[in-house]
Image: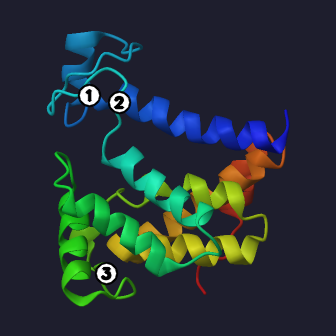
Amino acid sequence: MTTEERIAGGLLGVATGDALGATLEFMSPEAIAETYGVHREIAGGGSFRWRPGQGTDDSDLTWAVARAYLDGPFSLDRVAEGFLEWYRGGPRDIGGATAAALARLADTGDPRSSGETGERSCGNGSLMRCIPTALVRADASVRRRELAEISAVTHAHRCCVDSCVAYGEIVARLLEGDGPTEAVAAAGELDLDD
């Protein structure tokens, strides 16, 4: 498999997984099992009545990051502009930490101080949009810095930032041809204290 095929697969995987999972958003494991058994169909519906195949905020913000890379050298301001464009469009689904951070970003214009560091903002919202950075940044130090900066726009808690960096390491290692076990092990060896 070529690098280009792996990149395409990563982005398609995000979109497919998001469309599959949209049906189940906010459902408990018990409710999922009772309603669907094992959910394997992209059916739409769910809490927000998604169309089959429609992406959620996770896909939308992933595309905002991807577009920022396509438009030139990395710019956190360009990433933030993409997030704000999406936010101002009135998305039907947005997490609390993301909404608060983007409201702050809209007020201040500073993506470096918009995300909260408190535990109440310690969600998974920034993890969903890591794939583009992991796919386009071969240099590990650059990749880690950009993943941390992009996470912190909405989720600046250390656990969120570190999770994005570790996830990015896994994706980058898979892209390089490592197996899943080796990729996860490499992420586990990261020194995330600096």
Residue beneath the point at 45% across and 80% down:
77
- Callout 3 environment at 10 Å: few (<14), some (14 to 19), or many (20+)? some
Estimate the x, y position of residue 157 in percent, counting from the top left: 36, 76
Residue type indicated by callout 2: Gly
| CA distance separating discs 1 and 2 | 5 Å
Q: Are marks 1 and 2 in contact (CB under 8 Å)?
A: yes
Estimate the x, y position of residue 101 in percent, counting from the top left: 24, 74
144 or 183: nearer the eye? Answer: 144
Q: Who comes first in sequence, dot 3 or dot 2?
A: 2
**Residue 69 seen anywhere in this rendered image of the structure:** yes
Q: Is residue 80 left or right of residue 105?
A: right
Q: Quadrant of the C terminus?
A: bottom right
| CA distance separating discs 3 and 2 | 28 Å
Residue type indicated by callout 3: Thr
**Residue 155 seen anywhere in this rendered image of the structure:** no
Estimate the x, y position of residue 19 in percent, counting from the top left: 38, 29
| CA distance separating discs 3 and 1 | 28 Å
Residue highlighted by disc 2 = 21
Residue beneath the point at 23% across and 28% down:
50
Q: Quadrant of the N terminus?
A: top right
Secondary element type, mark 3: loop
Residue highlighted by disc 1 = 24
